[in-house]
Image (cartoon, rainbow, N blue to C red):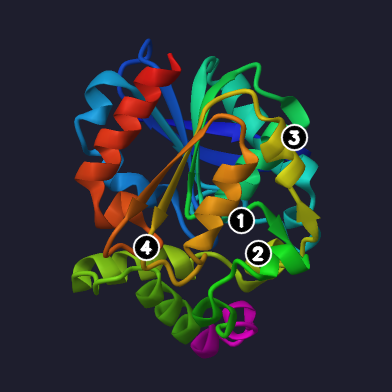
Amino acid sequence: MQTHTVRGGDDVTLHVEETGPADGPAILFLHGYSQSRQSWRPQFESPLADDYRLIAPDNRGHGESEKPPGTEPYQDSALWAADVDAILTELDVENVVLVGWSYASLIALDYLAEYGTERVTGVNLVGSVSGMGTEAAAELLGPKYVELFPELTSRDAEVSVDALETFLRRSVHEPLPLDEHYFMLGFNVVVPPHVRDGMRSRTLSHRDTLRDLDVPVLVTHGAEDLVMVEETARVHADLVPDSRTSIYPDVGHMPFWEAPERYNRELRAFVEECR
């Protein structure tokens, strides 16, 4: 495992980890809302690391990355795009498959809208989001997720932690083992409420970005996802010229954690198709 410090948009310090052969095909894993690079543990500790260069940052405001004050540093698509570009540039990554889970599918699309696909061979959208603050985007949000606001962004520690624990429980179909549950709750709690607030305060749509993509896209979605309804997968796949969809039965918002063997197998096949 290697650790890097990368300066992203507005010089924000990003913590990045990578494993696997330096000359292997690269996969950049971008985690979701209030999560961590640790979300990708089932991939980093799998045989994928024998053959592929696996890279995962803590997004700005998350984990060990810098957490600028205020909401503005989390509302600008150009800053999110610059973070991804800085990681690819600093680590000298070319021909990468971008994996964006949940909110991070929005971050991946921020990057693609700003910088295009020159360095990208494929995109895996997991439990994906393509817009915020619009009527079309709101229609794809699960009501069991929406009802957790404004508690998820509360400055009251007890209120926000309770909401985060409920959010985590609703992100999986079957209850997690207690050690995994509290492991994940820990890195959710590390994210300050102002970060979650800023991330939720954006208004944008990347549906045109999806329509314009000239690389293959794998849309991965849990059939029991309570955060983004299953219809999201069809909507996004229909927008992309070259897409395929994989629906996981009895899986919630985290297919890569809930069904890691299948997810890793399908990701491997997708990366090979994109080479």
Say which amino acid is labelled 2: Val
SS state under label 3: helix
Say which amino acid is labelled 3: Ala
Query: On the image, numbered disc 2 is attached to which residue?
Result: 195
Q: Are marks 3 and 2 in contact (CB under 8 Å)?
A: no
Say which amino acid is labelled 1: Gly
Which mark is drawn over residue 88? none
Q: What residue sits 64% from the left and 45% below the top? A: 107
Q: Are marks 1 and 2 in contact (CB under 8 Å)?
A: yes
SS state under label 4: loop
Q: Is residue 13 above or below residue 179?
A: above
Q: Is 96 left or right of 170, judged from the image as shown?
A: right
Q: Is residue 183 above or below residue 268?
A: below
Q: What residue sits 57% from the left and 49% below the top? A: 104
Q: Residue furthest top?
A: 23
Query: On the image, numbered disc 3 is attached to which residue?
Result: 113
Q: Which residues are magenta?
A: 149-160
